[in-house]
Every structure is written in structure tokens, then in C-alpha cells.
């Protein structure tokens, strides 16, 4: 395996990483490599592959759409796949307007800009933004600013605007210390909300990138109540959690909250095509309708509402709605296997939410740079399973279509890798 002379891979330090594995094809939960090896994609290729790779119904919908209308400028024009998708997502999220973009970062960036300008259009003085400790909202400059400061953002620190930061009281199986931490976080939020606040952004139920950090639904309800009582806008970043990942179609529904804005991407097209969607309430939309040119939302991407992405998203939604038991029942499939794995003395703080199961390895520092993650990754590859731990946080997030045998193979590989650590 060698590095290609003309490629630059994401989040990769070439000096210390092995060259990438070359993939020839993929089907269902499996990747097929050039050398003939097959690997279970146990993290759904950065959480995007929702049903499975090359899902036939989505592939067929994209192929059909490609022969009819592959792309058209979305200012001055509209089309059926975009309109259908907007209608369906509006009904499913309770948010009446859909603004398209290209990925998760831009979906969040759009939510931020809508929230910010909505207040400005009303000549409001609300300027504060509130986000949570450990938050990750994307890699653009605006979304890095919303996210917590980390190794990923350090180089850009002077470019990042300030936000007020509130603790994230994450929990795990058998946690008996969560209530006072939740109360403390709510106290911090109340204090922050005393400053006129434009918006509060959060990842509903689980922060993914900072280590699969799960909070209780009641905490999110208490957050939403306080934010709404203070008149600030509530932005749910469902880029990771949307489309069944937490066991409900959207994590906000599972938590019983209704945000003003919702950012979607990743599973939106079933993992086939890059697309972002920002859902906004009608109240926000109306705040941009005016005779004044400066009230316009001056934001647009070349590929806005790409018809192929819309067709993939519609086909993916069909699959989700026809087979809700696939996401609703996934947590029950993880639970006994994670319980069994948790008997390993090195496995700490196990937690499970929908299609996601995670734990920490007792191996020194709790950090993204903890080398144990790479050790586990190497070992699991030998057992035919692809994982990408976040330092010492190890997690599984397989596609919905994974078979029981494939899920068992993932846990067996993990158990063997952990035992091999000694
Ligand atoms: C919660 C959340 N928001 C935003 C993003 C950014 O999405 P993208 O990588 O598609 O830009 C991610 C990516 O992992 C995410 O998990």
C-alpha cells in the first residue's frame, strides 16, 4: 500500500499513518478491497451509509434521475424531487421550510446564518450564541467556532468568534452521578441566558465526534424549556443523529423537543450523495420576506438541491418509513452483545443509543490522541472489521441492514482485540 502522489486525505497525518486501503466495491455492510479482502464497515463510512452500501432501491432511483435531470441552478428554477423532499421532511420534522446545501458543516452554517440574520432583520440586539462543551458542528470556520475548542481547531483560534459554553452532562450505563451534573449544566445555561441570546445549538441526545457522549432526554427537554422561555432560537444539529440513528427518525422526537432550526446531512441520502438540508420554522422564513433587499438570505451553493441527491433522499426515506423496526429495534440487538463485552475489565462506561454502541478503554489518558484506538483498529482489521475509534473511545455504528452474524463478528473482533491488549 502506498500514498497516491496527487491526493490529500482528510484528518490524516501522513507522517504517522499507514497508507489507505484501496476499496474496489462495497455492498450491504461490506467493503471489498483491491486485494480481495472483505471488511465489515462497522462505522457506516463516517456515519453516512444508512441502509447499506449500494442499496439497490437508492442506486436505481439515482440512475433514473440521472437520465431525466441531473442538475439545474436552483435560483429561478425548482423541480419535483426537491419539492417532494421538502414536503416530506417538513411533515416529519415539524419545520415548514427546507434550505439545501452540500454537507453537514454547511447545513449547520446555514442554520447559524438564518438565526443570526433573523434577529438582525428585526433590528434586535441579541448577539450571544450558546453551545455546549465537547460540541462538534463541522469544519468550516463558522461551525468550528460553534464547536468546542480542540486539537482540530487549535490552528485557527484567532479566526473563531466567541460563544458562551455550557457543560454537557453525558452519562453511561450504571451512572449514579448524572443528576447533580445535569442540574449544574442547567444552572450554567440559565446564567448564560441572562445575556440577550440569539440562538442555542446542540447535538440532540448524543455528541458524536467528541466521544459518543450521550445525555438523557429529560436533560434536553429542560434545556429546550429554558431556551424557549428566554426567547432564544433552538438549533438542533441532527447531522449525525438524523434518520433513525438514535432509534427514532429524529433524536429531537425521541427527546420530545421541537427546535426552530434543524441541520441534516449524512444519512439524508442514505449515504449515497453529499447533501445538506437546514429545516426552519415558517416563523423564521417569514422574517426574510420584505421589500428591503438587505432582508434577503444571501446564501446559495452551486449544487443547491441537486436532483440526484434529492432522488437518493426520497428513496432512502421510503426505505426508512417502510421498515421502521430496523432502526427502532437496533438498540435491542446491541444491548446483550455490549453487556457481554463490558465484562472485560478494560471496558469502561458502556452506553448504547439506537444504532450506536460505545465504551471507553481503560488505557491512560481520555484523549483523541490516545494510541490505543489505532491498536484496536489494526487488530480488528485482522478480524475483518473496520472501526475508527476516537482515541480510547471505541464505538460501533453499523448500517441498518447489518445481519446478526455481522454484528456478532464486530463484537467478537473487538473482544479479541481487547484481550490481545493484555
Ligand atoms: C453533529 C455534526 N455536525 C456537523 C458535522 C459536519 O458534517 P460534514 O462532515 O458533513 O461537514 C458532523 C460530522 O461528523 C457532525 O457529527
Image: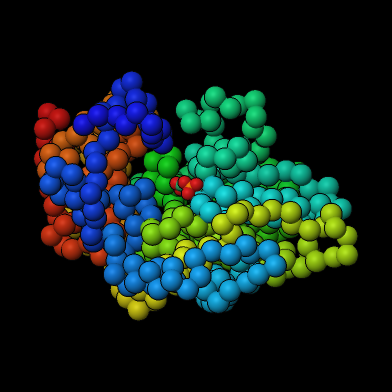
Q: Quadrant of the C terminus?
A: top left
> Does residue 249 appear in this view?
no
Q: Residue at x 74, y 54 (%)?
A: 298
Specify whether 3 is left or right of 281: left
Farthest residue to the front: give it: 67
Q: Quadrant of residue 382?
A: top left
Q: Is residue 95 above or below residue 337?
A: below
Q: Residue at x 52, y 73 (%)?
A: 81
Q: Quadrant of the N terminus?
A: top left
Farthest residue to the bottom: give it: 322
Q: Quadrant of residue 148?
A: top right
> Does residue 277 appear in this view?
yes
> How many numbered marks have been drawn onto this rendered protein structure?
0
Tell which of 417 and 56 is nearer to you. 56
| x, y percent for residue 420 | 11, 32
| x, y percent for residue 348 | 27, 39
Q: Residue at x 61, y 48 (%)?
A: 109
Farthest residue to the top: give it: 15
Tell which of 376 and 39 is nearer to you. 39
| x, y percent for residue 66 | 44, 68
Q: Residue at x 88, y 65 (%)?
A: 291
| x, y percent for residue 230 | 72, 55
Q: Is residue 255 above or below residue 85?
A: above
Amino acid at each position: 500500500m502506498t500514498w497516491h502522489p496527487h491526493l490529500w486525505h482528510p484528518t490524516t497525518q501522513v507522517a504517522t499513518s499507514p497508507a489507505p486501503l484501496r476499496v474496489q466495491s462495497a455492498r450491504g455492510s461490506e467493503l471489498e478491497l483491491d486485494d480481495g479482502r472483505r471488511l465489515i464497515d462497522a462505522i457506516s463510512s463516517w456515519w453516512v451509509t444508512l441502509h447499506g452500501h449500494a442499496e439497490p432501491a437508492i442506486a436505481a432511483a439515482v440512475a433514473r434521475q440521472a437520465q431525466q435531470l441531473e442538475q439545474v441552478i436552483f435560483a429561478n428554477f425548482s423541480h419535483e424531487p426537491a419539492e417532494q423532499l421538502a414536503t416530506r421532511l417538513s411533515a416529519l420534522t415539524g419545520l415548514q421550510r427546507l434550505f439545501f446545501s452540500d454537507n453537514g458543516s454547511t447545513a449547520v452554517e446555514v442554520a447559524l446564518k438564518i438565526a443570526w440574520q433573523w434577529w438582525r432583520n428585526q433590528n434586535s440586539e441579541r448577539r450571544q450564541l450558546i453551545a455546549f462543551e465537547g460540541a462538534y458542528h463541522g469544519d468550516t470556520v463558522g461551525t468550528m467556532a460553534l464547536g468546542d475548542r480542540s486539537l482540530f481547531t487549535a490552528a485557527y483560534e484567532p479566526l473563531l468568534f466567541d460563544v458562551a459554553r455550557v457543560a454537557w452532562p453525558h452519562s453511561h450505563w450504571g451512572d449514579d452521578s448524572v443528576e447533580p451534573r445535569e442540574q449544574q449544566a442547567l444552572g450554567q445555561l440559565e446564567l448564560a441566558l441572562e445575556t440577550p441570546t440569539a440562538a442555542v445549538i446542540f447535538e440532540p441526545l448524543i455528541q458524536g465526534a467528541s466521544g459518543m457522549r450521550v445525555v438523557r432526554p429529560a436533560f434536553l427537554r429542560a434545556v429546550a424549556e429554558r431556551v424557549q422561555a428566554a426567547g432564544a432560537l433552538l438549533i438542533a444539529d441532527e447531522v449525525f443523529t438524523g434518520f433513525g440513528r438514535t432509534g427514532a427518525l429524529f433524536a429531537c422526537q425521541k427527546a420530545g423537543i421541537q427546535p426552530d432550526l434543524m441541520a441534516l446531512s449524512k444519512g439524508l441520502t442514505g449515504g449515497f450523495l453529499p447533501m445538506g438540508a437546514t429545516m426552519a420554522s415558517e416563523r423564521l422564513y417569514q422574517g426574510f420576506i420584505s421589500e428591503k433587499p438587505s432582508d434577503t438570505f444571501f446564501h446559495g451553493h452551486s449544487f443547491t438541491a441537486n436532483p440526484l441527491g434529492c432522488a437518493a433522499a426520497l428513496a432512502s426515506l421510503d426505505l426508512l418509513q417502510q421498515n421502521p423496526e430496523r432502526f427502532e429495534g437496533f438498540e435491542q440487538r446491541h444491548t446483550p452483545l455490549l453487556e457481554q463485552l463490558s465484562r472485560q475489565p478494560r471496558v469502561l462506561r458502556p452506553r448504547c443509543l439506537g444504532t450506536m454502541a460505545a465504551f471507553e478503554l481503560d488505557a491512560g489518558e481520555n484523549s483523541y490522541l490516545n494510541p490505543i484506538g489505532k491498536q484496536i483498529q489494526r487488530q480488528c482489521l485482522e478480524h475483518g472489521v473496520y472501526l475508527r475509534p476516537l482515541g480510547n473511545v471505541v464505538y460501533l455504528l453499523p448500517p441498518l441492514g447489518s445481519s446478526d452474524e455481522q454484528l456478532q463478528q464486530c463484537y467478537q473482533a473487538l473482544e479479541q482485540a481487547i484481550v490481545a491488549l493484555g
